[in-house]
């Protein structure tokens, strides 16, 4: 069987110091190199990126543009892509050996799949530690199973590859999305085609302290969290517009699940910086229980409803005390009746 052409699309901005390693991780793949197109889009770098790319000659198709953000860079790269499959790679990440072969084989076995994605290996450069990720994986036609939108999480850029034909229905990505532009395509592709998850790490995600986006809650300052909220708000608004423009409405269960999932995320992020009023928080908890209720035990659903009512009394700022009291009460009852330690199950 003739292997399909795969375009590896690398977008970069002042990551010249990492870029060569990223390219080497592609050219060293066991996939036939005459079936690999490597496209590098330089989004206005002022470092030595261009000089570093020159050494590869015709192996690399290099395009420079004035700084326009991630969506702009991805749109340019995808316009230059010739491959049936488009694999994304951040300039500071690395493909692990066998990545392209595994992805191409997965697409071949599942001809209806619009996207293949996989787990990653985190490389903490300060400590040298390498750690396997444990992101939840969802496969299938989740448009037909609306509840799965609440379990589906977008993975980092370098974990995703698209079949070009369904991807083109999402292009161009709105260029107001300067960050998280890949999340726009990753979240919307289930409305067009099934997705497939490979349960192994096929990329090294480098953590070097200057990553454009990394959701480490312990290190996220209020300013950084505010910027992240703004970035996600632009992406969510863009996704909502695409759905509306393409005839999708809240009357469809999958659309309602999708929009509710992102409403919950947006509100939870906003609440950290701007605590909500009691009634707003009460409605948020009710929506959470409605969306995630099917995945919870009956006992947890009941407790969540009680907690929602309790939120009307204690409010958002003191809600964590209500949760502590609930866990203490459950533990006391279990110990009194020989049920062992409290499970510590977490609802929100």
Image (cartoon, grey):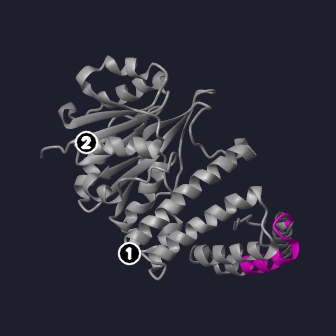
Q: Residue at x 49, y 23 (%)?
A: 46
> Where's residue 220, x and y in %?
70, 44
In the rendered structure, find residue 247 and report the number of the disc placed on it: 1
Query: SS for tag 1?
Result: loop
From this view, report whether residue 288 is shown above or below residue 61.
Answer: below
> Where's residue 221, x and y in %?
73, 43
**Residue beneath label 2, please?**
6
The quadrant of the picture occupied by the C terminus is bottom right
| Among the 4 quarters of the image, the one containing residue 201 | top left
State which region is magenta: 303-318
> Where's residue 288, x and y in %?
65, 73
| Among the 4 quarters of the image, the one containing residue 296 | bottom right
Query: SS for tag 2?
Result: strand
Please state if 34 lies on the left or on the right of 113 as rendered: left
Q: Residue at x 62, y 53 (%)?
A: 230
| Among the 4 quarters of the image, the one containing residue 186 | bottom left
């Amino acid at each position: 069987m003739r292997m399909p052409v795969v375009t590896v699309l690398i977008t970069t901005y002042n990551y010249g110091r990492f870029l060569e390693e990223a390219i080497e991780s592609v050219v060293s793949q066991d996939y036939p190199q005459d079936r690999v197109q490597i496209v590098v889009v330089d989004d206005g770098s002022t470092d030595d990126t261009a000089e570093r790319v020159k050494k590869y000659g015709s192996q690399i198709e290099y395009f420079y543009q004035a700084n326009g953000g991630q969506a702009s860079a991805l749109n340019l790269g995808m316009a230059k892509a010739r491959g049936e499959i488009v694999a994304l790679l951040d300039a500071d990440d690395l493909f692990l050996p066998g990545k392209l072969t595994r992805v191409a084989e997965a697409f071949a076995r599942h001809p209806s799949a619009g996207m293949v994605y996989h787990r990653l290996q985190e490389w903490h450069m300060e400590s040298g530690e390498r750690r396997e990720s444990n992101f939840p994986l969802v496969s299938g036609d989740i448009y037909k199973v609306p509840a799965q939108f609440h379990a589906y999480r977008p993975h980092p850029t370098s974990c995703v590859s698209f079949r070009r034909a369904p991807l083109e229905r999402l292009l161009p990505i709105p260029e107001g999305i300067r960050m998280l532009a890949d999340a726009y395509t990753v979240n919307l592709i289930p409305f067009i085609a099934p997705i497939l998850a490979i349960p192994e790490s096929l990329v090294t995600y480098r953590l070097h302290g200057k990553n454009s986006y990394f959701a480490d809650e312990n290190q996220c300052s209020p300013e950084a969290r505010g910027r992240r909220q703004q970035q996600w708000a632009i992406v969510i608004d863009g996704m909502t517009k695409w759905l509306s423009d393409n005839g999708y409405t809240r009357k469809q269960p999958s659309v309602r699940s999708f929009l509710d999932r992102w409403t919950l995320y947006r509100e939870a992020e906003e609440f950290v910086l701007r605590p909500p009023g009691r009634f707003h928080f009460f409605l948020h908890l009710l929506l959470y229980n409605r969306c995630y209720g099917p995945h919870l035990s009956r006992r947890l659903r009941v407790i969540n409803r009680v907690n929602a009512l309790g939120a009307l009394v204690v409010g958002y700022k003191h809600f964590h005390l209500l949760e502590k009291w609930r866990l203490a009460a459950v533990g006391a009852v279990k110990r009194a009746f020989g049920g062992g330690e409290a499970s510590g199950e977490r609802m929100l």
